[in-house]
Amino acid sequence: MGKIVEVNHISVYYGNTLALKNVNLEVEEGEFLGIMGPNGGGKSTLLKAMLGIVKPVDGKITFFGQESNALKRIGYVPQFSTIDRRFPITVREVVLAGHMRAGFHPFFQYRQEDREDAMKQLERVGMVELADRSIQALSGGEFQKMLIARALAVHPDLLLLDEPTASVDAVSRQQIYELLGNLNKEMTIIMVTHDMMAVSSNISKLACLNETLVYHGEPELSEGIVNQMYGCPVELVAHGVPHRVLKEHEGGHCKC
């Protein structure tokens, strides 16, 4: 087991606005890391910094012991809200796009093995029968599983996901967590989430962000950690039944 990701003292600004401050984080091979925090706390920014979409003003990020040539080993599932679902394209075509290689040109053609692999990835996420369906006709859960299949088309060693269950129903949410649990047997996973059910699901480590790293360790939250993230203790209710991911605490509470 070795280090897959090393985040060393990174800080990120958007103009004059601080997004991340002096964040240090290590992810070991085979881990399933959940990243939690309030809106605007820097969760998605950390993923974007890892992908090179935003550039830290300080610090560095290394993957697999190197700072470059690592992106081809990383699969990425963006937030649901960033994708235009009106685009006239099928599920199969979206997954095939994961096979686009460097040097794309107007006469680019997919290889037969690319087409076969796209169907294999759709089978992994349980969507073979929807391969020729327009993405406009997909449910939220189906859409997310399609995006996971596209990320799997690069055969990643590291899978990054940004809020993969934010726009799906309870049944689809559970299916996605089960899928990610199975994928974690083959690859390291880092997932940004607001869903506290994820904390008691498959994740093995938890990172809490609010501009800086509040906590990094076992997936159990304490009152102090939650206060630093949100300013109040949190009680999670799942399907109408209290489902604690917090240590017991005294005093009032709110449901976030």
Image: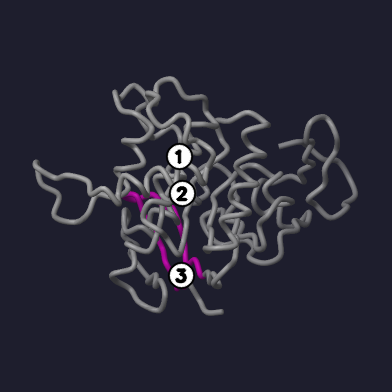
Q: Compared to 133, does 12 lie above or below?
A: below
Residue 55 coordinates in the image, percent (x, y): 31, 60
Residue 215 coordinates in the image, percent (x, y): 64, 63
Residue linked to disc 3: 7
Q: Compared to 5, does 206 lie above or below?
A: above
- Would residue 216 be counted in the magenta stretch? no
Near mark 1 (Cα within 10 A), the count class, few <14, some 14-19 or many ≥20, is some
Q: What residue do we see at 45% from left, 39% from top?
A: 79
What is the chief secondary structure element of the magenta stretch?
strand
Q: Which residues are magenta?
A: 6-24
Of circles 2 and 1, the one toward us is 1
Residue linked to disc 2: 44
Q: CA distance from mark 1 to mark 3?
A: 22 Å
Which amino acid type is marked by label 1? Answer: Gln
Residue linked to disc 1: 79
Secondary-structure class at tag 1: loop
- Mark 2 and mark 1 lie on one chain; the one further toward the N terminus is 2
Quarter of the figure with the N terminus: bottom right
Q: CA distance from mark 2 to mark 1?
A: 9 Å
Quarter of the figure with the C terminus: top right
Which amino acid type is marked by label 2? Answer: Ser
